[in-house]
Amino acid sequence: MSIELHPPELIFPAEVELAEAAVEADERRYMVSQWRLMGRRFVRNRAALVGGVVIGILYLTALFANFLAPYSVENRFFQYLYAPPQGIHLFHDGRFEPYIYPIKLTIDPTSLRKVYTVDRSRVIPLHFFVHAEPYRLFGLIPTDVHLFGVDDPSAAVLLLGTDRQGRDLLSRILIGSQISLTVGLVGVVLSLIFGTIIGIASGYFGGRLDDLIQRVIELIRSFPTIPLWMGLSAALPPNWPPLLTYFGITVILSFIGWTWLARQLRGKVLALREEEYIHAAEIAGASPLWVITRHLIPATLSHIIVIATLALPNMILAETALSFLGLGIRPPLTSWGVLLQEAQNIETLANYPWLLSPLAFIAVAVLAFNFLGDGLRDASDPYTVS
Amino acid sequence: MSESTPSDRPILLEAIGLKKYFPIQRGLFRRTVGYVRAVDGVDLAIHEGETLGLVGESGSGKTTVGRLILRALDATAGTIRYRRDGRLIDLTALPRRALREYRREVSIIFQDPYSSLDPRMTVLDIVAEPLRIHGVRDEEEIRARVRELLQLVGLRVQHMNRYPYAFSGGQRQRIGIARALALRPRLIVCDEPVSALDVSIQAQVLNLLRALQRQFGMAYLFISHDLAVVSHVSSRVAVMYLGTIVETAPVEALYTEPRHPYTEALLSAIPRSDPDERRTRIVLPGDVPNPASPPPGCRFHPRCRYAREICRSEVPRLREIAPGRQVACHLAEELHLAGIQPPAAGGPGAAGRG
Amino acid sequence: MSQPLLEIRNLRTHFFTPDGIVRAVDDVSLEIQPGETLGLVGESGCGKSMTAYSIMRLLPRSARIVGGQILFRRRGQTEPIDLARVDPGGDLIRDIRGNEIAMVFQEPMTSLSPVHTIGDQIGEAIQLHQGVSRAVARERTVEILERVGFAAARQRLDQYPHQLSGGLRQRAMIAMALSCHPSLLIADEPTTALDVTIQAQILELMKDLQQQFHMAILLITHNLGVIAEMASRVAVMYMGKIVESGDTRTIFHRPLHPYTVGLLRSTPRPGVRAEGDLTPIPGSVPDPFAVPSGCAFYPRCRARTRPSCRSPEGIPLREVEPGHFVRCTLYDDARPG
């Protein structure tokens, strides 16, 4: 050996130095809250983003439905019963000038059936921001401006056709979305309140209370849903005003909805209860209320939101099912389910397939909610490595 | 270090005949079919400002003892007495509300630096939580206290608004220590505080705990399965086996001349710290028995190589065999058990005492 | 001595993640002689397990061997084959795995199937690799279980892993690993999840079995005590690189790399209530995405550092005395005698 080898002399480090990682990273990166991390992950998920945008558009549409719809729900065109959807032509003489051709009812001489024929001899221009039937925007501001319409009182713009009574289907779908999209919302909010309180209490306190709650949930869930809903909605007094019925229906929907959330939250809380930071708070003397509001609710909030998003389409479907059976929303209120009720027999379907167009809206809404919910679920755990 | 003999100091907390049975429940109606005797008659005393090491393998009940002492669990039987204003008060007899005062004076440091910090809170909120629970409302005061606490544990004050994920395991453990210190407790239960950390970080945290004790004089109940770690921080050590304490002794005495066969086996099982160290290894046969049906007599007898007839039938009591030394073994006076010869640092003289 | 069983040359295994590349194994060279125990020490995230998975070709999807050789001498063959070039899903590696190189993991529950009995799992491995009948395989299973200290092995053949204690499960896994008499056993933290007394049982067992079967062991652990107990040679890893390697006694008595010294000094010794404190290593392991250039240990190093520590070319692993390799600028002038 050429030189003597010694273990190196080590300098004893100071306490602050000891704790610090020597590599200083960008400080801002470490002050990002859970919600911001979630947001970042969410934005990376294309499908969820599209779902979110679609849902945004749907709710905006519902909000401005009266303005977007050319007619009101009850406006009947007796000359156009079961009229098929009309096409819009966008360019006239090379300029952007949307117009429609009027339709005319004729009788097919051979089959003797009513047939609408397009009269291409006349052009009816579409106008924007037309003054037509008066309504109240957001139920408050009285106005009569509609996004589009025709000036010619003898003609009508019927983009999705009409129903048995000659009512414009597009207008009915748009205005019906107000109820269909909100009945779920109110129902989900109600289930969230019940489900969160009951689920967290069940998981956190455990014991007898937990047993009791779980048995009640099992009992409620052991009933077949549709008959249960039917029974409950049959119990709503028939002489209630439509608005009250509407709230009655939301309560019925949330009657089962909360059990789902309560179960999920209970499981989550059972796992959280064993987290050491919960023990730390308890050992420091925190009350159950403190633990629930400071730790358990924040920890499950992202979960609650995800569950709510995923529960909404079920609510929409449930409302549709009930109304379809004639047990939910009743005319004069209009919802997507009410609209589908008119498409119940095979003859109507065969002859007037456009009556099924509400289905497309339901499907789009449900899919969009599911995409959004899945995206939120994936994003809600920002601490896992992608 | 200005340490007097630990047993000279007044007792801060003592547990007498502490028991915790967890019911085993089966079926739909939760019928109790038996009990897991997690802690089955534990006597121990913690003196003011000392560190009592509590060693045992998994399932020995050491963590449950910690929780019982913190009153996070209700004991099935036994009493815990705690000194306040010169008097020993019985904690097991106190109503829940009266425990609030006690909760200000004890705290805990956990094993898992990940699970022990709420990932949704900033460091400031985590460390301030005990203060807020106990009614400190003034935000300025809270910030000042947190700042001071972070400095004490060697963290940068600027990092107060970070979330836990921004820290390494060792730094997270420091945050947990800052939280435990927030109310200036008189007793901290350290439940495997370094087991989840890498070797180099373990030493940082052990040093920190010792430095804080020198500064503030609180007592530690140091729970660990690692005998080397325990010996490094403790003044006295209690060894647990299957819900009972088998031996309590000052740390040097326990390691050099154990008086219970289980302690002897435990010591001989520690991997040597030097390739040249020669040691007789006692390999214990089998596994720790099920705490739901512990063996009769001495709980260690099925694995004990010295077991005799009396060990199979009679339960040995924990008794004092020398000042500061307690053993629960019928044969304590007869057996000559092997300890660890301390390496060069301890000096050759330390081994030969008998 | 000149015929190593396994020789790893300049192995590089990288992880390709959305956030960047992690050099989990970065230029690692190792040599294991037949029948010896090599200890590979390091803290979590240093790349010691990934080295083992590279040998077994059991890397996760996001990881790839990007360079180097893993030369393994198969039974009865003089020319080694390069495992780094073998198809990781092919028949060759599957034939070697289990048969000639076996592995024991930290958590036996994750590597034993919970839905098959112990007897079936070990028996199947024997049937598969030795091509014997079911009945013969069952007999051999009993035999091997008895050799790893399973009391009443025959009765326990039909037990499921969850019915066994941690120690017995680890024994079952060792039995499974040894069932085909491998020439190399890779043990990845084999006793970390176990209690001290059970750890002692397993370590004794491994020593016994090594002598009986004359197999080499690559022992991966963070526990220096286990190394002192078991290994004849040690390699210390830090951030994907070997920073020091040599004979166990030399490493324990005359460690040269500041990291090794730090590790040894931060380990408490039983029975010594140290008058002074331990000497910890400051800071913590750097972010794997931002490894400092030059010596990766530089920011935590408490020895006198030199400008060359930050050399962008990195620090070479140098043989400072026969058989003792160090990757540190402090010994730039040392020459092996």
Image (tube, coloured by chain):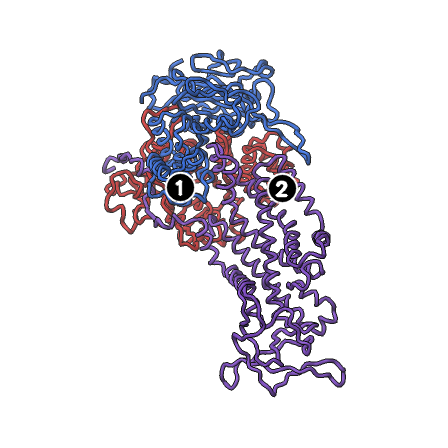
Q: Residues within 10 Å of mark 1 (few under 14, many from 20)?
A: many
- Look at the image and tell me whether residue C180 can be seen: no
Give x and y (percent) for residue C208. Answer: 50, 31
Give x and y (percent) for residue A197. Answer: 57, 43
Q: CA distance from mark 1 to mark 2?
A: 46 Å
Task: Give chain A's shade.
Answer: purple
In the image, is B93 to the left or to the right of B85? right
Q: Of the residues shown, which amino acid type is indicated by label 2?
A: His
Residue on which disc 2 sits: C116
Residue on which disc 1 sits: B123
C3 versus B184 height, above or below: below
**Disc 1 on helix, strand or loop?**
helix
Contact, mark 1 vs mark 2 (Cβ under 8 Å): no
Task: Give chain C's shade.
Answer: red
Give x and y (percent) for residue A73. Answer: 63, 68
For discs 1 and 2, the disc positioned in front in the rendered view: 1
Task: Give chain B's shade.
Answer: blue
Q: Of the residues shown, which amino acid type is indicated by label 1?
A: Val
C220 versus A36 height, above or below: above
- Look at the image and tell me whether residue B240 can be seen: yes
Q: Chain of mark 2?
A: C
Image quarter for residue B190?
Answer: top left
In the image, is A118 to the left or to the right of C72? right
C22 versus A1 height, above or below: below
